[in-house]
């Protein structure tokens, strides 16, 4: 069973890095979004650094959501999902492996690049690490909430933007606590740990609920 | 060329038979009683009953849209029967989905991965490893494509890689949906050989087909008369 779990994880990582896998696309999209914001807002450094964490979080959210529709759709189209259904692995664990691979190829690189992109939005140096930490803790929630939406639309051809539209409202709590934890690192009355721990809790809950919900959705799909 | 393929198949067949684990499957029987299928509110078929035991093959026939693929989807658990029962006996508490191999219209291969990677993945996923990916590819006459991405292969070669999946992991029930589509004459003969071996080991085959399966003992089950 562990072998099957690792096989799915390894395959999805390999697929994301091969040609046409789109693994790096989310990162480039994130970069584009964050680069565009200073141009739109003008050279007001105070304003930029005040809304910097929010921009980074919005960018990470959108970058995670745009590629999500392919999470199960590719496997559904070419019949790999039938193979996974016939495997010795419970569907929940298969979803967990796929969600984990998605986070490793999307959320993790986004969080690691956040300090670098923080420069573009004039984020103060001592806030870089906390912002990256909130992204590291919060992006798993995005991947697994999104997995549920992706599973619901797995058999839809041209699902395209349905997944982001479906999933975005569910990510509001993650966004609120992610940005609030990042802002508390910039100064303010709330200690950093309070929103940060809630963010961690949201991620843990999303991993469990999202995995079960996505597996249930895949079972219902015809 | 054809003869050398056949020779390879035969020698590999001997290898498989001399592998250390038990060469024959535990006796199990799949039975369908009064099965009905409904898709999108429309009744596709009803009152379908058949039984399939070890060493037996069923050729599933019927006009286009009669529900052959739907029946296969039902057996592999992707579709719920609208009526009737599907039973599997003699398998202990293993669910039906862990006893079967499926080679369908959608070949379950990732175009960006090589043939060997695809087969290794299937083996890890399905368990009960038997032949290695390289041996399985040799058995379907494609030992030279192991390192090629599946996206570069022709339709017939892809179908053969999908069929090689049947060999990398040992499962008693083969569900095949139009297994011979896109195969050339030599590959069709190869497929018949693989199916014969499987039946000889006590396995069971259910294949949807428009032509003949090429197996002598195969029963025909016709859907939607």
Image (cartoon, grey):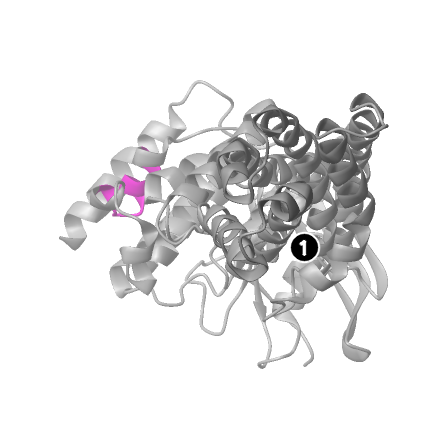
The chain under label 1 reads A
Quarter of the rendering containing residue B44: bottom right
Residue B172 location, x and y as percent? 58, 40
Q: Main secondary structure of the magenta part?
A: helix
**Residue A9 vs residue B80, the one in the foreground:** A9
Q: Residue B200: within the magenta?
A: no
Say above or below: B170 vs B179. above
Residue at image position (69%, 30%) is A137
Q: Position of residue B112 (x, y in %)?
A: 37, 50
Residue in view at x 23 percent, y 42 percent: B143
Please, what secondary structure does the residue beneath circle 1 have?
helix
Between residue A57 and residue B128, name the one nearer to us.
Answer: A57
Q: Which residues are magenta?
A: B135-143
Residue A175 is situated, as x and y percent measured from the top left of the image, at 76, 44
Q: Quadrant of residue B8?
A: top left
Q: Position of residue A37 (x, y in %)?
A: 56, 55
Residue bearing mark 1: A150
């Amino acid at each position: 069973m562990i072998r099957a779990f690792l096989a799915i994880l390894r395959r999805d990582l390999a697929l994301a890095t091969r040609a046409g896998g789109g693994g790096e696309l989310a990162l480039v999209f994130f970069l584009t979004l964050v680069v565009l914001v200073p141009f739109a807002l003008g050279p007001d450094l105070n304003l930029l650094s005040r809304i910097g964490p929010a921009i980074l979080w919005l960018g990470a959210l959108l970058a995670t959501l745009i590629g999500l529709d392919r999470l199960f759709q590719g496997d559904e189209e070419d019949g790999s999902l039938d193979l996974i259904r016939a495997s010795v692995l419970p569907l929940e664990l298969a979803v967990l492996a796929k969600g984990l691979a998605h986070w490793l190829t999307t959320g993790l690189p986004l969080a690691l690049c956040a300090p670098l992109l923080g420069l573009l939005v004039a984020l103060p140096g001592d806030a870089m690490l906390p912002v990256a930490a909130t992204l590291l803790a919060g992006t798993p929630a995005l991947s697994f909430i999104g997995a549920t939406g992706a599973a619901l639309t797995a058999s839809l051809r041209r699902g395209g933007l349905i997944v982001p539209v479906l999933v975005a409202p569910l990510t509001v709590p993650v966004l609120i606590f992610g940005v609030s934890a990042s802002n508390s690192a910039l100064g303010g009355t709330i200690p950093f740990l309070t929103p940060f721990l809630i963010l961690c809790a949201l991620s843990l809950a999303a991993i469990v609920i999202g995995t079960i919900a996505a597996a249930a959705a895949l079972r219902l799909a015809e | 060329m054809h003869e050398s393929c056949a020779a390879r198949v035969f020698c590999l067949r001997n290898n498989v038979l001399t592998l250390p684990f038990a060469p024959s499957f535990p006796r199990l029987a799949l039975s369908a009683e009064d099965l009905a299928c409904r898709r999108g509110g429309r009744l596709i078929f009803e009152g379908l009953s058949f039984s399939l035991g070890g060493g037996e093959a069923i050729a599933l026939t019927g006009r286009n849209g009669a529900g052959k693929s739907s029946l296969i989807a039902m057996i592999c658990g992707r579709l719920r029967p609208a009526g009737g029962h599907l039973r599997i006996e003699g398998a202990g508490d293993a669910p039906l989905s862990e006893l079967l191999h499926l080679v369908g219209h959608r070949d379950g291969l990732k175009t960006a991965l090589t043939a060997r990677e695809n087969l290794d993945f299937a083996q890890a996923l399905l368990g009960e490893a038997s032949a290695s990916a390289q041996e399985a590819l040799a058995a379907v006459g494609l030992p030279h494509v192991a390192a090629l991405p599946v996206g570069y292969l022709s339709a017939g070669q892809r179908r053969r890689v999908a069929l090689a999946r049947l060999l990398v992991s040992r499962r008693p029930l083969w569900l095949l949906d139009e297994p011979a589509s896109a195969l050339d004459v030599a590959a069709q003969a190869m497929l018949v050989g693989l199916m014969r071996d499987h039946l000889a080991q006590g396995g069971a085959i259910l294949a949807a087909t428009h032509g003949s399966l090429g197996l002598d003992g195969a029963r025909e089950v016709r859907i939607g008369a």
